[in-house]
Image (tube, coloured by chain):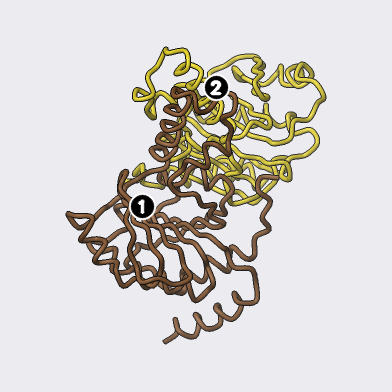
Chain colours: A yellow, B brown
Amino acid sequence: MLDRVRERILGRGIRGGEVPSCIAVVISAEAVGAHWWRKVGTVAGWCTTLGIREAALFSEFFGPEKVEDLERELADVPARGRLIIGAEERGFGKGGPLRLFISAGSGGKEEVTSAIRSLLVEVKAGVIDPEAVDEEAIEARLRLNLRPDLLIRLGHRELSDFMIWQSAYSELYFIDRSWDDLKKVDFLLAIRDYQRRERRFGR
Amino acid sequence: MLDRVRERILGRGIRGGEVPSCIAVVISAEAVGAHWWRKVGTVAGWCTTLGIREAALFSEFFGPEKVEDLERELADVPARGRLIIGAEERGFGKGGPLRLFISAGSGGKEEVTSAIRSLLVEVKAGVIDPEAVDEEAIEARLRLNLRPDLLIRLGHRELSDFMIWQSAYSELYFIDRSWDDLKKVDFLLAIRDYQRRERRFGR
């Protein structure tokens, strides 16, 4: 009841300001329950209501035995989803304005490494010159071609090797709560905090 | 006076616990005064007293016109220092147990990019096979071959593109203060906070 009142007040304030276009949420194994995917739809709904256009979730913990099972479990999520597990990528969700990415177990160093490997193959094949390889060339080969405005970390205060390249200038926000216990109020407080910051991108 | 008392109490508590072996401090242009290097010696002293063995400072702002001038300014710093500016690297400091790295303007994406470029050259020359390139191969070619246990960010709550690869699992701590105003008490509070965390490295 009290939460509802707070949600309304927070929501009203937030709609007056600039909402992050892209967010990332890092939920590592410990902060995740056995059925983490059941909450994905709820959080996708929060994002959509606020006008967030892209969201990336990271969990080290996979869950179901097969990718197909997880994909099926996520079928009703109100988003255009991509599920990334290792080198595999699958679609899920029932569509909507939100582009949602779920990375189950694929970390940032691995992502940068595989971008590099594909560059190496191109160099060996003579398609690209080593001199021509710059930050943009690497960025273009990352699996998650996103730039989170806000990165929310649940449970701990470290990045846990997610989107290390893309989050170089992301605003960081920590919530000391598990994924299962995450409330809309917590989420709204993170967005409000973001709105109060003056972004400088390192300058 | 009050600060001294707090320093003593904090210091005593800290010595009973595990001190981070390696720290990183991110101070971007805004949080840095015109003569930021004058404080380097003081902070190096704090690190040494606590038993910190490696520290890396990042400032986007260079300062003096010539590298040699900055090197001279830093001559009395109680540490074995390396000054990194672009591709240049110079020694400074009067020695001691602390290895101190100062990166003036060289960001993390640039660092990873140049590690990749050197790998690409080796691949083109046939020295390495693209298949053999893994996270360790990249890590070994980074300018700063460190792994910060604790990353302290002054002024803002984003990483500001410093050591993006190396800080994947660093504990993050924010201090809302400029470099010039940073007090020993702030620094000790960061270390104490670190000691109270349970590190999980994403697990």
Residue B93, quarter of the rendered image:
bottom left
Q: Nearer the viewer, residue A198 or A57?
A: A57
Q: Which mark is residue A106?
A: none
Could you classify mark 2 by the number of other residues whose Cα lies within 10 Å: few (under 14), some (14-19), or many (20 or more)?
Answer: many
- Quadrant containing the N terminus of chain A in the rendered view: top right
The residue singled out by tag 2 in the image is A98
Residue occupying the point 47% across, 16% down: A122
Q: Which mark is residue B103?
A: 1
Residue type beneath disc 1: Ser
Question: Up-down: is A38 above or below B183?
Answer: above
Residue B61, image x and y in percent?
A: 27, 52
Residue occupying the point 64% across, 65% down: B196
Residue B122, image x and y in percent?
A: 46, 29
Q: Nearer the viewer, residue B172 or B42?
A: B42
In which chain is the residue bearing label 2? Answer: A
Could you classify mark 1 by the number of other residues whose Cα lies within 10 Å: few (under 14), some (14-19), or many (20 or more)?
Answer: many
Residue B110, image x and y in percent?
A: 38, 38
Please indicate whether residue B6 sits to the left or right of residue B203 in the image: left
Question: Up-down: is A141 above or below B114?
Answer: above
In which chain is the residue bearing label 1? Answer: B
Residue type beneath disc 2: Leu
